[in-house]
Amino acid sequence: MRKTIFIILVAILSGLACRAQEVETVESLGNVVTVDSLLVGRTLAEVMPACVSINSSAAVSSALDRIIRDNETRFFNGYRIRVFQSSRQNARDASGAAMNRFNSLYPEIVVFRDYTSPFFRVMAGNFRTRNEAEAMLIKIKSDFPEASVVREKFKYPDL
C-alpha cells in the first residue's frame, strides 16, 4: 500500500515538474489558415517539454505522415468573425481598408478577404467552437460594431 502511494506521489510530482516548463508557441499571421499555432512548422516531438520523451517506431511515423497527407484536402466546420461585407460599388477598396484596419488593431488574429458574388467580405480568425468566436467578438465589437460570427469550412491545419 505504501509503495503504491509512493509511486502515485512520484508520478504527480514529476507531472508538475513537466508542466512548470513553458512551451513556446508560434503566432501565425497572414492568409495561412491555421487552427492550432503550436505545431506550425514543428513536429510533436519538438514541442514536448524536455522531460517527456517519445519513442515510436518508423511504422507509427509513416502512418502519421500518411494521415496528414490524406487529410490535406479535407475540411472541417468552424467559425469566423465577419468584420465587413458589402456589395456597393466601392466595396473592393472598402474591404481592403477594413482588412488593413483590422490587421493594425489585432495583428495576432489572422484575417481574410474574399469575393463571393456580389459581396466582398472580410473574415477574421479560425475558431473551432462558437464560444471561442463569441469571446473574440466581444473584444472587437467596439472597433467593428457590425461584426458577427459566421460558420465556415476550413482546411485542416498544417502540422
Image (cartoon, helix red, strand yellow):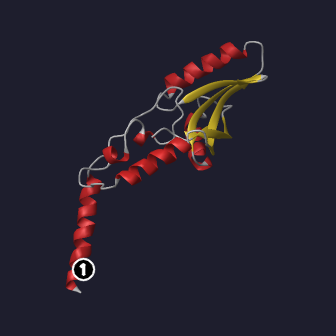
133 to the left or right of 1: right
Of 70 and 136, nearer the camera is 70
In this view, the residue farthest toward the front is 59
Residue drawn where x is 24% and y is 50% of the image:
50
| Number of numbered discs overlaid on the protein picture | 1
- Position of 32 with respect to 119 (left or right) is left
**Residue drawn at 23 percent across, 75 percent down:** 7
Which residue is tagged 1?
A: 5
Q: Residues within 10 Å of mark 1 (few under 14, many from 20)?
A: few
Relative horizontal placement of residue 46, taking residue 81 as reference (left or right): left
Picture quadrant where residue 126 is located: top right
Element type at marker 1?
helix
Where residue 148 appears, as percent x and y from the top left, is: 67, 37
Q: Amino acid at mark 1?
A: Ile
The residue shown at (24%, 80%) is 5
**Residue found farthest to the bottom:** 1
Report x, y in % for residue 114. Answer: 67, 24
User: Residue 72's image quarter?
Assistant: top right
105 is higher (above) or lower (below) than 70: above
Indicate the quadrant containing the C terminus: top left, top right, bottom left or bottom right: top left
Residue 158 position, x and y percent, is 48, 38
Q: Position of residue 20 (x, y in %)?
A: 26, 53
Q: Classify the position of the N terminus by image quarter.
A: bottom left
Viewer-proximal residue among 126 and 52: 52
- Say above or below: 37 vs 62: above
Examine the image and state in which quarter residue 102 appears.
top right
> Residue at the spot x=39%, y=49% of the render?
61
